[in-house]
Amino acid sequence: MAQQACTGRILVGVDGSQASAAAVRWAAAEARLRGMRLHVVHARDRHATDQAPYAPPSPGQFAAGPAAERAALKAAMREAAASAGRPPVHFELVDGPPVRVLLERAPGAAMLVLGSTRSARLADAPVGKPRAPLGPVARDCLRAAPCPVVIVAEPGVRPEVEPVGTG
Amino acid sequence: MTSRAENGSQRRIVVGVDGSPPSKAALSWAVEQGRRTGAVVEAVIAWEIPATYGYPVPVSDVNWEQLAKQAVSDAVADVADDAAPGKISCKVVEGNAAQVLLDESADADLLVVGNRGHSGFVEALLGSTSQHCVQHATCPVVIVGDSVSSHLS
């Protein structure tokens, strides 16, 4: 891979959501503060469909994909460009499962920054089932990342008031 | 997030400490971060009288608050030998750990926790405290594993 750990870099995973825009903003400020590079990665998982992995892709299957990918990355680029001070940024669009893509790039990074959509964390969980604290990507990154993981919450959403159980 | 720093108030990093190795890694990460950002680091330990089932266990001779105070000051002494000691404050609060950390970090710039504390299953992904913090905190949450301390420069 083309990353060098010498100057230090901050890895950010983006998916085009508001939360990942907040993550890019936070990471850009952090990169400026530390004099590090920003490494923004968007992984697109071509197998994250309901088709068998060996099925040949149908012509229209990814029609909506690339546009959405470009929009996601563009949004991240805008966020990074809008951040004052402008740390050097390296954008990467990768084919592959997001967790693997991020973990491959995590060694040598000072930290891995991910956004967390609050609605995905709380509102969508079925009542009565234990709520997943995070999306699957953040969850697996937390388990395996060799660097600290920063979870930046979606801005402008007040946390839901919920009593914290003991234990 | 950044607005708190921009409006001139002191940056604050709240770190949850329970004396476990991941919490010490979290503390040293927070100290390093505080040094970089000029933030004050607040090491917070929560304590509560343990729940018992069935017959109450006589624990009146144990001073939980004193134990907690000891744990946090030991952790700070371990981690902060080369840091400016005045920049780290310790706070001992009675209550549920997750709730205490959320309350303390309500107007902080960053909340730092270890990925697992003393309680919880070994195979559990995140400790219950880290989990609650990630879920409910209003500021960015940093989760530091105990393998991370060796990555610190």
Image (cartoon, coloured by chain):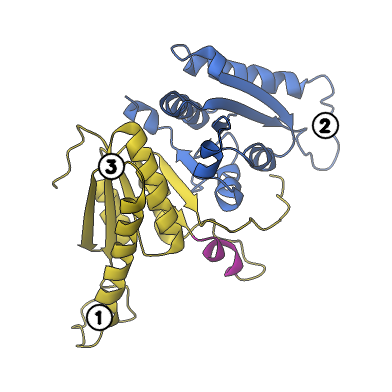
Instruction: Give the percent coordinates (x, y) of residue B101.
Output: 64, 38
Residue A130 within the segment the image draws in magenta:
no
Residue at (61, 71) in percent of width and height? A126
Q: Nearer the viewer, mark 2 or mark 3?
A: 3
Q: Taking B126 as reference, is A130 above or below it?
A: below
Rounded to the nearest angstrom, the CA distance separating label 1 from label 2 is 63 Å
Q: Residue at x 68, y 40 (%)?
A: B103
Residue position marked by numbered label 2 in the rendering? B57
Q: Residue furthest left?
A: A2
Chain drawn blue in the picture: B
Which of the two labelled residues, at mark 3 and mark 1, occupies the earlier sequence position?
A: 1
Q: Amino acid at mark 1?
A: Phe
Give the label on residue A47, or none: none
Q: Is residue A135 left or right of residue A73?
A: right
* B128 relative position to A166: left or right: left
* Element carrying mark 2: loop
Q: Secondary structure at mark 1?
A: loop
Q: Nearer the viewer, residue A74 or B31?
A: A74
Q: Name the magenta segment's main secondary structure.
A: helix
Residue range in magenta is A117-125
* Mark 3 vs mark 1, CA separation in Å: 33 Å
Residue receiving disc 3: A87
Residue A41 placement (x, y as % from top left): 27, 55
Instruction: Give above or below for A158 relative to A29.
Output: below
The tag on residue A62 is 1
Rendered hue of chain A is yellow
Quarter of the picture holding the C terminus of chain B: top left
